[in-house]
Structure formats: structure tokens, C-alpha cells
Image: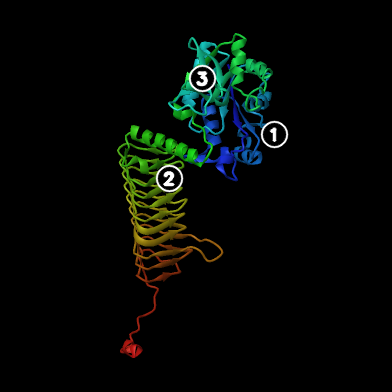
Amino acid sequence: MELYSIILAAGEGKRMKSKLAKPLQTAGGKTLIDRVCAAASGAGAKENIVVIGHGAEQMKAHLGDSVKYAYQTERLGTGHAVMQGIEYIRSRSGAVMILCGDTPLITAETLCAAYDRHCADGCAATVITAVCDEPYGYGRIIRRGGEVCKIVEEKDASAEEKTVCEINGGMFIFDIQKLDSALKKLTCDNAQGEYYLTDVIGILKNEGERVGAYTAEFEEILGVNDRMQLAEADRLINLRNVRRLMTDGVQVLNPETVRVGDDVSVGCDTIIYPNTILEGNCEIGEDCVIGPNTRLKSCTVGDGTEVQSSVALDSVIGSGTAVGPFAYIRPNSEIGDNIKVGDFVEVKNAKIGNGTKIAHLTYVGDADVGERVNFGCGTVVVNYDGIHKHRTIIEDDCFIGCNTNLVSPVTVRKGAYTAAGSTITDEVPQDALAIARARQVVKEGWAKGKKK
């Protein structure tokens, strides 16, 4: 049986108080709508149909051709929104998940389990429910003899119905044809004057159809309506990811202060210190020490490497390497094995060979550096002439003296030295010493006269 999804994302989200459409707000580094679409696809949805309205152009610009679009120009309730989306699949057989574009905590695993239950029980509809101690504001699941008979919204519930703690998670799985038939019988005779999708459950029950329920964790059905709820969703997503690393054998010190993205992987016995941010497609090896006060974005880090109080972006760092404190590895850098990148060192778009030492206060940009090179303090690769960037080549076993300026494009051949304080503008031959500074001149008594 084929499975589809209709994702409701047409609301205005006034409480968010943002120029950005609510489903495009981010939690855990990804937009709310991307998270819901990923969960639907992960559960096996052949197509995702996103119902858009407010911020439609923003939504289309973000999602592109990855989904189908339905338009809800008048927001007349959830049932009305589903009426727009079902147009794409009305002639098809199978099942459809109805999801909300502002519930980023729902997982593919939960949707898979609910779908399996739906199929196994032969239901016309399956409601994803949750149980909470304070159900105010949620629709209540009303059962008779253990079977779901209807869903009552808060404003329409009786005093007795309001005591029920099993709530509607706002997500459903329906047989497509039976849903389409029931939608045609919906009315807006309720306190809100809207077409409630939840009323479809009563319609199906009155027609003798079976309605099932799958109870999820309360956390997974949480919606996002304002900045406080967005922050809470972000916290819970991050906590999931931190726990995932710890389950895989990573030691996370003070987990509440560490941020970990969905696509981050870390090897066992690595230690992550407080105030560390790991985001993007980070892949960190085993036996590393990361942090404190470190940010890595889309970096690959080899085994046994330490990155302390530093930032590295879109780069590769090898094994047995030490970075920091206070180093900055900018995009497109390749730092090899057993390298020292010390304090206040910046590396940008450069390849650094194994065994090289860049101890402190040095800038290496647009350069190809060989193995076992030693950079003295205060070295600058002068890569920009004001219009174009140029590249510097430093071959193996070179020694770059303190306060050397390497004016690109320039090459320092294998085993060569540069004298401290030199400005190198021409190629330095193999095993040569390049001295590019003025001869010292001493003027006796000059300082004494200056003071007078």
C-alpha cells in the first residue's frame, strides 16, 4: 500500500512575531518544515504535499521542488486545509499521513510505528495521541469500551470531557478514499465556525469504520507557536543529539552546555568539554578532546586530535593534531596529521602537510605547505594584492623565521630558511637562507638627544 503525507503549513503564526513564515523558523539548526518533511519521508511517504498560505512564496523558495504544494487562501480550519491537499491524491489508493508543519519533534520511527499499527488493525483512521498531566488547550480523545469514538476540541468539550488526559497529537493516518468521502460531509457547526479535521473521526465511526490510536511520547507532538516554544523544541532536539553521542561512547562533560547537530558523528572515547558547538556535517574520530569553548562546523577530525577554545569551519583536520587555544580554521583548509596550530593562528583555504608547526600569531592563507615546516611567531602569508588572491607554496622541511612576510605568489623550496623579519617576494631556492631586510644602522646618542 502506498503512503503519502499532507503537511499543514498555511498558518500565519502571529505569536512568533517574525517576518519569516513560522514553518521556516529553525530548531536544532534546521527549519521546522524540513524536520517534518524528513520525518514523513523517513516513514516511507512517496510524496509530501505541503499546504501553504501565509508566506507561500517564502515556503516555495525554501522547499523548491522537493514537495508538492496545495494552497489554502482562506484559513477555515484543519479540515479545510486537508481538503486542499487531498486534491493531489484523490484518485489514488493507499494511506495518507496528516502532519503539522510546526511539530519538529515528531520522528520517522514514531510515524512508522503508527503506520504499521494502522495497517495491522485494518483501520480507516489512526490518531496519534499522547498523555499529559495538564491537557488544557488540546483536543481530548474520547473512548468507549477502549475504542476511539471521537475527538472533542477544548472549546467544545464538556466538563467531564475536559478531565480526559489523553490528547490529540494533531497527526493522523487515513485511508485516502475513506478520508475523501468523510471530508465531503464536514460542517463548520462549532464554536470556532471552522471545518475541524477531528470531526472526520466521528463521521467515520458513525459509518461503522474502525478508528485506531497510537500513543506517542508527549514530547513528540509538541507544536511551536511562539519564541518560547521554539526555544524548548530546540533544547529537546539538542538533548536528543547529545544523548545519542553519549550512547555511542562519547564522554560529554556538562551536557546542558554542549550543542550537537543532527548530522554530527563522534567516535568513542572522545571527550567533549563544556561550551562546545558541533554543527553541520561534522565527523569526529575516536580519542579526541574537543573544547572547551569550541565551535566546529562541517569539519572532519581524525583520531586523537585536540581542538581547544577554537573555531573551525568546513575543513579537514587530521589525526594526532593539536589546534588552539584561540585558533581560527577557515573554510577549505586541510590540516594534516601530527600538526600544531597554536594560539592566535588563522588558516584559510590552505593545505598544511604532516608534522608542520604553526605555533602562534601567524596567518596562513591560500597556501600549500609541505611536511615538517616550522613557522616562527608573527609570520604572515600576504595573499591579497587588493584585487586578487594569490597562492604561496612552501615545500617540505622549511623554516620560516619570526615576523616573515611571504608576499604571494611566491615559492620557498625544500629545506630553505627565511631570516627573521624578512619580507620575501622572490623564490627561495632549495636549502638556501633568504634574508630580506635592511642592514642595521646604529646612531650613537640619538635617543638621549630625542629626550631633550
Question: Is disc 1 in contact with disc 2, using a CB cutoff of under 8 Å?
Answer: no
- Whether residue 398 can be seen here: no
Q: Which image quadrant is residue 175 in?
A: top right
Question: Is disc 1 in contact with disc 3, using a CB cutoff of under 8 Å?
Answer: no
The residue at the far front in this view is: 159
Is 410 placed above or below 51 here?
below
- Distance between the Cα atoms at labels 3 and 2? 53 Å
Q: Which residue is mark 2?
A: 299
| Label 2 neighbour load within 10 Å: few <14, some 14-19, many 20+ | many
- Distance between the Cα atoms at labels 1 and 2? 43 Å
Q: What residue type is disc 1 on? A: Thr
Q: Which residue is mark 3?
A: 161
Q: Which image quadrant is residue 73 in?
A: top right
Question: Mark 1 or mark 3, which has the lower sequence index?
Answer: 1
Q: Secondary structure at mark 1?
A: loop
Is 47 placed above or below 291 here?
above
- Return the x and y of residue 43 as percentages of the image width and height: 52, 24
